[in-house]
Amino acid sequence: MVRIIGARGGRPPGFDELRYKKRNTVERAISFLKQSRTVATRYGKRGYVFLGTAIAAAVTIWLRT
């Protein structure tokens, strides 16, 4: 199989620096949330329980910074 690089494949033609910065911020926030064991392993099986756990972890992170 031959891979064609150029107009039909490869990297996207443009790089948006602002979008990349926002993506990095979101990925770091998710990483901070996953440091909480209950968020990372998702012990709460119901959606509202998990949402409450994620909010509690986010508030804890916010208060520490």
Image (cartoon, rainbow, N blue to C red):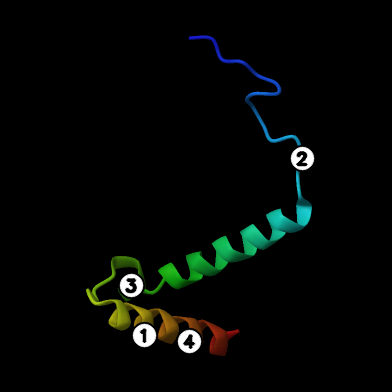
User: Could you tell me residue 20's position as x and y percent?
Assistant: 69, 54
| Residue at screen point 67% across, 32% down | 11
Circles 1 and 4: CB distance less than 8 Å?
no
Which type of secondary structure does the marked residue at label 3 adopt?
A: helix
* Real-space CA distance between mark 3 and mark 2, rounded to the nearest whole angstrom: 38 Å
Q: How many labels sit on residues? A: 4
Disc 2 or disc 4, which is closer to the eye? Answer: 2
Q: Tell me: residue 19, above or below residue 14.
A: below
State which tag comes first along the sequence, 2 or 4.
2
Q: Mark 2 belongs to which amino acid?
A: Gly
* Real-space CA distance between mark 1 and mark 2, rounded to the nearest whole angstrom: 39 Å
Seen from the viewer's position, the closer of residues 64 and 24 is 24
Disc 1 or disc 2, which is closer to the eye? Answer: 2
| Residue at screen point 61% across, 15% down | 4
Instruction: Give the numbered dot on residue 52.
Output: 1
* Real-space CA distance between mark 1 and mark 4, rounded to the nearest whole angstrom: 12 Å
Q: Mark 4 belongs to which amino acid?
A: Thr
Q: Residues within 10 Å of mark 4 (few under 14, many from 20)?
A: few
Seen from the viewer's position, the closer of residues 25 and 35 is 25
Which type of secondary structure does the marked residue at label 2 adopt?
A: loop
State which tag comes first along the sequence, 1 or 2.
2
Instruction: Give the numbered dot on residue 37.
Output: 3
State which tag comes first along the sequence, 3 or 2.
2
Q: Tell me: residue 22, above or below residue 20.
A: below
Q: Residues within 10 Å of mark 2 (few under 14, many from 20)?
A: few
Which type of secondary structure does the marked residue at label 4 adopt?
A: helix
Residue situated furthest front in the rendering: 8
Seen from the viewer's position, the closer of residues 41 and 49 is 49
Q: Residues within 10 Å of mark 3 (few under 14, many from 20)?
A: few
Picture quadrant where residue 48 is located: bottom left
Q: Which residue is mark 2?
A: 14
Q: Which residue is mark 4?
A: 60
